[in-house]
Structure formats: C-alpha cells, structure tokens
Image (cartoon, rainbow, N blue to C red):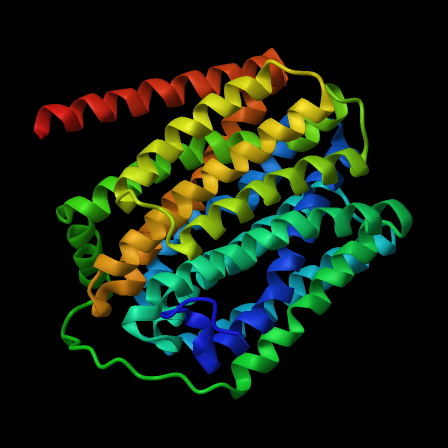
Amino acid sequence: MVLFKNSALSSKNFKLYFCGNIFSVLGVWIQRLSLGWHAWQLSESAFIVGLAAAAQYLPLLILTPFFGVLADQYKPRSSAIVMHLILIFVALSLSVLTLTNQMEIASLLFLSFLYGVANSAYSPVRLALIPLLVSSKQLSSGVAISSAGFNLSRFIGPGIAGYIVTVYGLGYAYLVNAITYIPVVIVLAFIKVKEIKTVRDKKEGFLEKLKKGMTYTFNHDVIKNVILIAGVSSFFGRGLVELLPVFTATIYDGGSETLAILMAASGLGAVLASVIYMSGALDLKLSKGVFYGGFGMSIMCLFFALTENLIFGSVTVMMIGFFITFVAVGSQSEVQLNVANELRGRVSSIWTIVVLGGPAVGSLFAGLLANALGPKLTAVIFSSICLVILSYIAMKKVRQD
C-alpha cells in the first residue's frame, strides 16, 4: 500500500527490508527493558543501572566514527548481515547465562558492552543502506518510516518484554530477542541493492578519511546545527529515560509491568512524532522542528520530575518520547538530505555519536546523581541544564542572524 506519492514503501527492496527489520527492532526494545531490569535485580543500584545503559551506548560514542569510515568502504548489506549475526550471539549468551543462573553483574555489563559495539558498527551501516533501497525523492520518507517502525517497536516491545519477563523470566526474553534478528538476516541475504558510484582516493589513509568526514560536518552549517541540538537533547533527555527502572522501583513502587507501561508510553509518543514526519504535516523547516523539539523535551522532563502519579507520569513520559523522536528524526532527515553520498557513512556516524551515543554519558551521570540525590532531583537538574543550554544556543543564533 502506497501511503504517499513519494513513499519509500513503493520501493520493493525497502518494503522487504522494513518488514524484516521490524522484528529485529522489536527485539531491541525487549532486550533494553530486560537489561535495565536485570541490572536493577542484580544490584538494586541506580549507578549500576546507569552503568549498564552506558555500556550499551559508550561504544557508539567512541567507535562509531571509525565504523563510519568502514561503512563508506564496504558494502552496507554484507556488513549489516555480519552485525546481526553478532547481535544474535550476544542475545543467546545473555539467555544461556540467565537460564543457567550464572549471570553476574560483571557478565551483564560485558555483554551489554559487546551489544553496544555491534550496534555502533551497525548504525552507520544502516544509515548508509537506506539510500540504496529508495530513490532520492523517497529518502526523507524512508528515514521517517524506518523511525516509525523503530518507535512502534518502542511502544509494543516493552509490553511484550514485560509479559515475557513476568511470566517466563529474563532468560526467555533474551532468547526471543535472538530469534527476532533472523528475518532481517534472511531478507538482507536475498534483496538486491543499487550501487552508488563515488570517487575514492586510494592514497587517502584511514585517519585522513576520518578527518575529512569530521571537517565536512563541522563546516556544514545546517548539519552542524541540527547535530548539536540533537546531541544536547539526547544527552539529557535519553540519558534520563535510561533511569526508568529506577523511577519504577523507587517512585512508583512497581515491577517489570510498571516499567513496561512507562517504556510503552515513551514508545507511543515516539510513534506519534514519526507519523507527523511521515505525513508531511510539519510546516516548519526541519532545523526549526529539531530546535523546538529540544525545548519541549526539557519541559516534559521537568514535569516528570514533579509527579508521583503513574498516569500523569506515563503521559509526561509519552511526551518526552514524542519530543526526543521529533528531534532525532528531524535531525537525521536533515543530515541525510544534505550530506554528500561519498561521505554519508562518516557524517552519519557523527550523528550516531551524538544522538545514540549521548545517552552513554548522560545515563552514567544520571545514575551517579540519582544515587547521591535521588531520581526526582536528578530529573530536575537535567531538565534545567538542558533548558539553559538550548536557550544559550537560541540567543547565539539570533545574534548571528
């Protein structure tokens, strides 16, 4: 079914990839809930929960630029298959250790880190793969639809994870995650992707290629600005969301079912934001949408800190998810529409660092603050600092204009 005139769903290859990938991203959210709740069960420490989240995101922060260079050198489809096989191995390892009662905090943190390494390699590959599956007119739609699928999984995944963890246990949740990667591996093995010819300097070394991508990004005003705003929002907003297991246990006095409700609420908000981009109803420029989304996210984090009611808390978490996604999809679309093809992997890797790697440091700081000051005060501090930084960026931009 073609939803829009230039919908990426009119591309057979993209449609096949999307259908296969939707299962794997569903598994992502099953595993994220499981890892966060597992960390809390093993330690009952906000710091350990934050550390487990950081272990998943820190590789994105450190390794992604290097994987971005490789993404520009190797075929994205083959690279994506390899990364998914590694993710299957990690999920199966988590499952076996948990089902045999051999899981310890150190093992959980190590496997979370390995999971993060594989994701850091896959992120620029995924972003480089989408333009090969659609036409240039369908690119923005492809980004939005991929995001919608990812965020629909954020809505559905936690509910499934909460049920599996409650009824069957964490080990089976990890096993289900491993199984969800199989369809996309099969799809990637059979689809054909178009080749985009790029001019490559064979004499150019690895570090020179890395530097070229960074220089291009920082000298491109549009790309630089949306990545900066997305980075600030990701650090404070998503860093705080990673502490939902702590809020669940200490503020709402709940278990995995309550955590599933909060994570599903965040996913629902994310889906709504993605739908807005898919429909073309956004009448603002993408860069302005990214900026306003950052402000909205900060304000909602402040409201979340001031409530102990699960219903109102779920609504504010839904709005946090909405604005975080508003920023993420808008910034990714702006980058994809403006970047040169031969630098797509490297520039996309920088976007990945700030948007997906930001929570690595943000969640670690949030965990430390929550241990010392409590989760509510931590949320107030994070939202306040984010508002100050975004206000500074706004005033600076006004002076420049």
Instruction: State the residue in front, 158 or 381.
Output: 158
Q: Residue at x 53, y 46 (%)?
A: 272
Residue 133 point in image, percent of width and height: 40, 76
Q: Position of residue 171 (x, y in %)?
A: 82, 54
- Residue farthest to the right, as pictured: 167
**Nearer-the-camera pick, 239 or 396:** 396
Number of on-image labels:
0
**What quarter of the picture does the C terminus occupy?**
top left
Q: Is residue 74 left or right of residue 19?
A: left
Q: Quadrant of residue 124?
A: bottom left
Q: Which residue occupies the foreground of this view, 105 or 151?
A: 151
Relative to residue 342, is residue 238 depicted above or below?
Answer: above
Image position of 91 (left or right of 73):
right
Q: Quadrant of residue 392?
A: top left
Residue 72 makes an appearance in the image: no
On the image, the x and y values in percent for residue 90 come to 66, 61
User: Is 183 drawn above or below residue 208 in the view shown?
Assistant: below
Q: Position of residue 329 (x, y in %)?
A: 40, 49
User: Could you say which is closer to the camera, residue 222 or residue 15?
Assistant: 15
Residue under the image location 37 percent in, 75 percent down: 134
The residue positioned 38% from the left and 32% from the top of the image is 294
Q: Left or right? Give the position of 140 relative to 342.
A: right
| Residue 205 visible to the viewer | yes
